């Protein structure tokens, strides 16, 4: 059953964009909405607002904050069990000598993940979303007030393990990074296209298990590019460290770009670096 | 997509606007949901009544206009219709597409009294 326009379609055509009064006024909107004289008078009000406008406004504020402070923020998204937290632990261990790093962890419950990050010596803040299935930009804004990342630092935001909802919620990050483990099946990008369309980078994790699986790496990347021709892919294993250098190098260049944006706004150098990280 | 949350977003937006307009109640809420937006219209409808309860949107009819998907095909150099993300270009069968129309989810207008 579809609920399309029907009688209301008439009402809609009345209020169409032909004239530009702020509010179009209508009395009686066709047979289904006929009003008795002297009774209530219905009118149409143009809204034209995105359902996620509130989140997007918070995200824009976060993004301004990141830019002003030279902070490079990533939003890491994946299904539960893809190895995100292990990847984060390995990443912060490799990078914390090079520049300040901090982490925001999103989970429905527990602070287990933030505890794992803090064990590396890096500041981490846990957000418990309760029944919520994703982080939103407002939560991240609050987390920033508490965490206060240093200027020119790397901020890694581990979203709730979920390949659906986090795709729609901008947190103000520079990029979404989708982590897909090779134990999950190469068709995930086709099954959850919105997430892979929203991500700029895909990390194929747990590559050390490839010899034991039928997972087709080339096919997984091809599927991801079907929903997002621009997506970049890196194959790695957070456990053995294989492929980690490529990911860390990518982060290094991105950090340079963020620092340039924050400080000198050297557009020429930014352009060169961006060309370098492109495939 | 968490349609319950989106329904809350819709009701918040509608209630806020209706108060600003000083109306008694909202009769109709017209939404535009793009077919490439990842949102299931029926699921929003399912959640809307519950979320609207106790607000000016309570009892409002929800009119959902689904917008067809359209993408720019880099290989054909033209706009092509697209039913779903991950589908090939209907002209050349390629996947070098950029979504153009049908990604929005917005409140278009309200009928208030």
Image (cartoon, grey):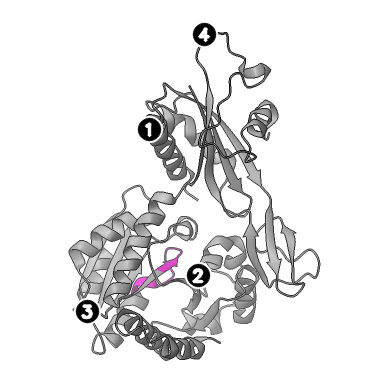
Label 4 residue SS? loop
Task: Based on the picture, tell me whether residue A181 belongs to the magenta stretch.
Answer: no
Q: Mark 1 points at which residue?
A: B20
Chain under numbered label 1: B
Residue behind mark 3: A120
Image position, residue A123 (x, y; %):
20, 73
| C-alpha separation, residue under disc 1 versus residue under disc 2 | 38 Å
Q: Do the residues labelled 3 and 1 touch (CB within 8 Å)?
A: no
Does residue A260 sit above or below A112 in this rendering?
Answer: below
Q: Is residue A152 left or right of residue A216?
A: left
Q: How crowded is mark 2: few (under 14 residues within 10 Å), some or many (20 or more)?
A: many
Q: In which quarter of the image is residue A197?
A: bottom right
Residue bounds of the magenta highlight: A76-85
Q: Mark 3 or 4 closer to N-term?
A: 4
Question: Residue A4 at what x, y percent from top left?
Answer: 67, 35
Of the two numbered discs 3 and 2 in the rendering, the one whose residue sits closer to the viewer: 2
Q: Nearer the viewer, residue B29 or B112?
A: B112
């Amino acid at each position: 059953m579809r609920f399309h326009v029907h009688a209301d379609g008439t009402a809609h055509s009345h209020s169409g964009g032909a004239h530009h009064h702020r509010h179009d006024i209508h009395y009686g909107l066709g047979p289904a909405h006929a009003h008795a004289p002297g009774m209530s008078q219905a009118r149409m009000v143009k809204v034209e607002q995105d359902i996620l406008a509130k989140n997007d406004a918070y995200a824009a504020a976060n993004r301004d904050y990141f830019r002003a402070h030279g902070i490079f923020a990533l939003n890491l998204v994946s299904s539960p069990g893809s190895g995100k937290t292990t990847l984060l632990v390995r990443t912060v261990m490799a990078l914390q000598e090079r520049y300040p790093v901090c982490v925001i962890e999103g989970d429905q419950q527990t602070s287990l993940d933030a505890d794992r990050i803090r064990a590396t010596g890096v500041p981490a803040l846990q957000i418990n979303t309760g029944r919520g299935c994703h982080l939103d930009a407002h939560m991240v804004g609050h987390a920033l007030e508490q965490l206060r990342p240093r200027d020119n630092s790397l901020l890694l935001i581990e979203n709730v393990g979920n390949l659906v909802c986090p795709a729609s919620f901008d947190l103000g990050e520079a990029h979404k990074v989708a982590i897909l483990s090779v134990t999950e099946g190469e068709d995930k990008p086709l099954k959850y296209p919105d997430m892979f369309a929203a991500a700029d980078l895909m990390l194929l994790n747990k590559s050390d298990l490839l010899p034991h699986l039928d997972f087709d790496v080339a096919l997984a990347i091809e599927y991801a590019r079907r929903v997002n021709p621009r997506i970049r892919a890196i194959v790695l294993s957070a456990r053995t460290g294989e492929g980690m250098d490529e990911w860390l190098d990518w982060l290094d260049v991105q950090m340079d770009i963020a620092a340039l944006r924050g400080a000198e706004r050297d557009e020429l150098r930014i352009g060169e670096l961006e060309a370098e990280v492109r495939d | 997509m968490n349609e319950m949350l989106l329904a809350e977003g819709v009701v918040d937006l509608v209630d806020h606007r209706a108060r600003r307009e000083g109306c008694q109640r909202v009769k109709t809420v017209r939404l535009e949901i793009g077919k490439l937006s990842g949102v299931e219209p029926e699921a929003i409808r399912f959640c809307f009544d519950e979320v609207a309860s106790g607000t000016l949107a309570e009892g409002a009819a929800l009119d959902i206009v689904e917008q067809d998907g359209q993408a720019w095909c880099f290989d054909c150099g033209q706009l092509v219709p697209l039913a779903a993300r991950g589908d090939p270009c209907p002209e050349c069968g390629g996947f070098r597409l950029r979504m153009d129309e049908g990604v929005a989810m917005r409140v278009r207008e309200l009928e208030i009294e």
